[in-house]
């Protein structure tokens, strides 16, 4: 569609090999240069927050695990902390360590998956195959530990549902060594001339832009924002393990820096895993049964946050004292990083759009919300599934 | 007589090209730790695509869109057949090397124009990219071929280059100009094959297969055949112009030449495409104006200075 004499509107999505999930980047290009990028969402809304208000607190635990197929531990990990905070439940130390261990394994598999996606975006199929092959060993261990590769169901309110056997522990110790090797190898790959030529200086997000757009996670840390929930708001076993890891921070803010931060985090996750396995407490205790949890959680509200693989994940939960939630609010890292994406995409070449888009590691289905926009005033607000079911009516 | 020979050579070059595609996919998969598809998978794909419905986008220029894949594949197969006839010694036309490369160029251009006529904006972007890439690598490719075959008799013919090498051994091993020209040609081959790192015209994640985006069914089968034949013909041209080895009997030499083409393609197309990332359009043009062009001009200079 011609906009002007030289400008062309190019729909990058909603179904596009580079976006994976349905999101539409409407690009205005001048030849190969992107003049403007406008992100449009709304293709995979699932109404999870509204649905959470129709289920009891224990059922919601299983619901939030399904917010994201990649961060399927981070969401319930964050949710149980919010509910435990309202109820004043203290999980046993071993359970906190197991949550931490699984969180770090999840970070490993997420970053490896992401490296593969980056390779695919750049046409570097060998990198894609390598990263996804080594990721399998992480998933294999998670499967052996929990019975599932993706929806692992580790968390329970007041504890965990799985324990760590000596056999799995030994395998994890071997994995830690492998993870360091993968990190070293992937770091070399990132400095391959063709990869570097595609990522260095591309999609730059300055520190001030990262702060003003509210970027989080590796995206912010690659722009010099030294913030990590694990260190700055320690939860679970991170308080005990504070000395076992460092937070990689780079200042160049380009796509290469975002990749380098993630590769460095692989090694740091290995360090964390090693320390957690070495100091794993032995206080095995089952979590309280669901009917007791439903009885014991009083009316109240709480927030919790964890460092998901993509960045800070935030949960707000308000309970009604009858075993249900009055409100659940989830802020995923991708939601926080999307404004930064618009800054990164300005003035890049068309060829760089896939790499820049992938560099924030977007997860669209976690992020989707429905907004009701008043066409006359331009005012907007979020809506619930129930409201949508009734039709917008007077709200629209 | 020549027409009959070309007709006989056409299925041969098409079969060899698809078979090379199968080898390429298998080797690429093995290098990545995968099993990969069977060697004959490209034949299955071709037959299956032929059996699909023909779909023409409403916004397309119908005649150009539908005829381009057919014309493109016909031109590519003709180029390959001419090369085979030259190798067999039955075609001794001055300048046939230039004709073969020109046919391959027109085949590529036709496919791009046909795809761009679909009305899809990605195909239009791809056409703009394709023209830029095409002219950036075709120039050093043509110079290197001229440098290689100019010493043969008759001038610039495959048969002449073969005769010369039957007397004095493989050109790339017996002369500086031949070695430089082969190096330049090998660097141009990935662009001819539209593979990574130079597949900017059909990059999946950037332009969603570019000019191929709307093609499906028989049109896609023919478009893929055209690309496949162009890729293998370029490799066979390199093998015959630079590495033709006298082995006593013509059939053995031809078999060795075909094997050489596969090895060259595996090095220049398969291995390179597996282990590097895709470059940008301007990087493609910049690259070809530097190393391959310098090598090709060096080959020509060496030839003119009498070091052939």
Image (tube, coloured by chain):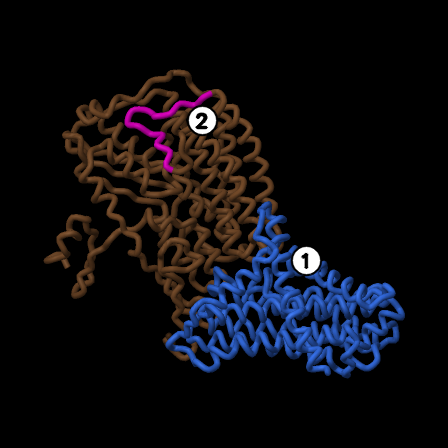
Chain colours: A brown, B blue
In the image, the segment drawn in magenta is A151-165
Q: Identify whether A338 is placed above or below A312.
A: below
In magenta segment, residue A226: no
Q: Main secondary structure of the magenta part?
A: loop
* Residue A51 visible in rendering: yes
Residue matched to label 2: A241
**Number of numbered discs present?**
2
> Could you say which disc has been placed on residue B266 in the image?
1
The residue under the point 75% across, 61% down is B260
* Residue A246 visible in rendering: no
> What secondary structure is marked by label 1?
helix
Q: Position of residue B219 (x, y in %)?
A: 49, 72
Q: Identify whether B248 is placed above or below A217.
A: below
Residue A328: name its quadrant.
Answer: top left
Q: Position of residue A240 (x, y in %)?
A: 42, 24
Q: Quadrant of the C terminus of chain B?
A: bottom right
The residue under the point 70% across, 60% down is B262
In magenta segment, residue A161: yes
Image-based side of B275 in relation to B146, left or right? left
Determine contact: label 1, label 2, CB under 8 Å: no
Image-based side of A278 in relation to B233, left or right? left
Q: Quadrant of the N terminus of chain B?
A: bottom right
Q: Residues within 10 Å of mark 1 (few under 14, many from 20)?
A: some
The residue under the point 65% across, 55% down is B271
Q: Identify whether B41 is placed above or below A243.
A: below
């Amino acid at each position: 569609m011609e906009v002007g004499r030289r400008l062309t509107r190019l729909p990058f999505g909603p179904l596009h090999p580079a976006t994976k999930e349905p999101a539409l980047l409407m690009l205005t290009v001048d030849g190969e240069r992107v003049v403007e990028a406008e992100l449009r969402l709304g293709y995979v809304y699932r109404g999870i927050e509204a649905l959470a208000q129709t289920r009891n607190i224990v059922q919601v635990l299983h619901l939030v695990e399904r917010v994201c197929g990649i961060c399927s531990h981070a969401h319930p990990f964050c949710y149980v902390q919010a509910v435990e905070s309202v109820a004043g439940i203290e999980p046993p130390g071993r359970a906190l360590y197991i949550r931490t261990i699984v969180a770090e394994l999840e970070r490993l598999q997420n970053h490896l998956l992401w490296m593969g996606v980056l390779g695919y975006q750049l046409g570097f199929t060998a990198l894609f195959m390598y990263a996804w092959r080594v990721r399998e060993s992480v998933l294999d261990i998670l499967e052996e530990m929990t019975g599932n590769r993706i929806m692992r169901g580790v968390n329970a309110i007041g504890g965990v549902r799985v324990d760590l056997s000596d056999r799995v522990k030994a395998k994890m110790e071997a994995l830690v060594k492998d993870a360091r090797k993968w990190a070293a190898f992937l770091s070399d790959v990132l400095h391959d001339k063709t990869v570097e030529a595609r990522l260095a200086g591309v999609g730059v997000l300055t520190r001030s832009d990262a702060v003003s757009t509210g970027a989080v996670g590796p995206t912010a840390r690659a722009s010099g924002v030294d913030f990590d929930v694990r260190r700055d708001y320690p939860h679970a076993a991170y308080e005990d393990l504070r000395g076992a890891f460092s937070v990689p921070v780079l200042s160049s803010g380009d796509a290469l820096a975002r990749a380098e931060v993630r590769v460095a985090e692989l090694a740091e996750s290995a360090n964390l895993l090693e320390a957690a396995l070495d100091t794993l407490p032995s206080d095995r205790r089952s979590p309280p049964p669901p009917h007791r949890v439903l009885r014991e959680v009083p009316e109240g509200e709480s927030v919790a946050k964890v460092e998901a693989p993509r960045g800070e994940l935030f949960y707000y939960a308000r309970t009604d004292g009858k075993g249900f939630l009055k409100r659940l609010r989830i802020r995923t890292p991708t939601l926080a990083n999307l404004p930064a994406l618009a800054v990164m995409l300005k003035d890049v070449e068309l060829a760089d759009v896939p790499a820049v888009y992938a560099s924030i590691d977007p997860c669209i289905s976690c992020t989707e919300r429905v907004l009701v926009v008043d066409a006359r005033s331009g005012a907007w607000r979020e809506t619930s599934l129930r409201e949508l079911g009734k039709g917008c009516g007077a709200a629209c | 007589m020549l027409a009959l020979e070309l007709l006989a050579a056409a299925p041969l070059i098409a079969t060899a090209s698809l078979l090379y595609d199968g080898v390429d996919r298998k080797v690429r998969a093995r290098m990545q730790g995968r099993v990969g598809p069977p060697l004959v998978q490209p034949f299955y794909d071709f037959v299956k695509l032929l059996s699909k419905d023909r779909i023409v986008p409403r916004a397309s220029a119908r005649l150009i869109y539908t005829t381009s894949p057919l014309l493109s594949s016909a031109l590519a197969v003709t180029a390959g057949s001419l090369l085979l006839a030259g190798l067999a010694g039955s075609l001794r036309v001055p300048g046939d090397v230039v004709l073969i490369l020109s046919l391959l160029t027109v085949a590529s251009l036709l496919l791009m124009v046909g795809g761009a006529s679909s009305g899809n904006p990605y195909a239009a972007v791809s056409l703009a990219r394709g023209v830029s890439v095409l002219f950036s690598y075709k120039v050093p490719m043509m110079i290197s071929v001229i440098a290689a075959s100019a010493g043969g008799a008759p001038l610039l013919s495959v048969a002449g280059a073969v005769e010369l090498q039957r007397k004095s051994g493989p050109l790339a091993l017996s002369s500086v100009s031949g070695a430089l020209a082969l190096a330049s040609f090998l660097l141009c081959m990935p662009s001819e094959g539209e593979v990574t790192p130079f597949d900017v015209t059909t990059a999946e994640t950037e332009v969603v297969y570019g000019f191929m985006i709307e093609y499906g069914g028989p049109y896609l089968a023919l478009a893929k055949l055209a690309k496949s034949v162009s890729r293998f013909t370029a490799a066979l041209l390199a093998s015959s112009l630079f590495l033709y080895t006298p082995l006593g009997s013509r059939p053995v030499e031809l078999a060795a030449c075909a094997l050489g083409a596969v090895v060259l393609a595996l090095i220049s197309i398969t291995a390179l495409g597996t282990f590097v990332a895709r470059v940008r359009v301007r990087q493609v043009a910049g690259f070809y104006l530097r190393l391959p062009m310098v090598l090709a001009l060096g080959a020509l200079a060496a030839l003119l200075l009498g070091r052939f």
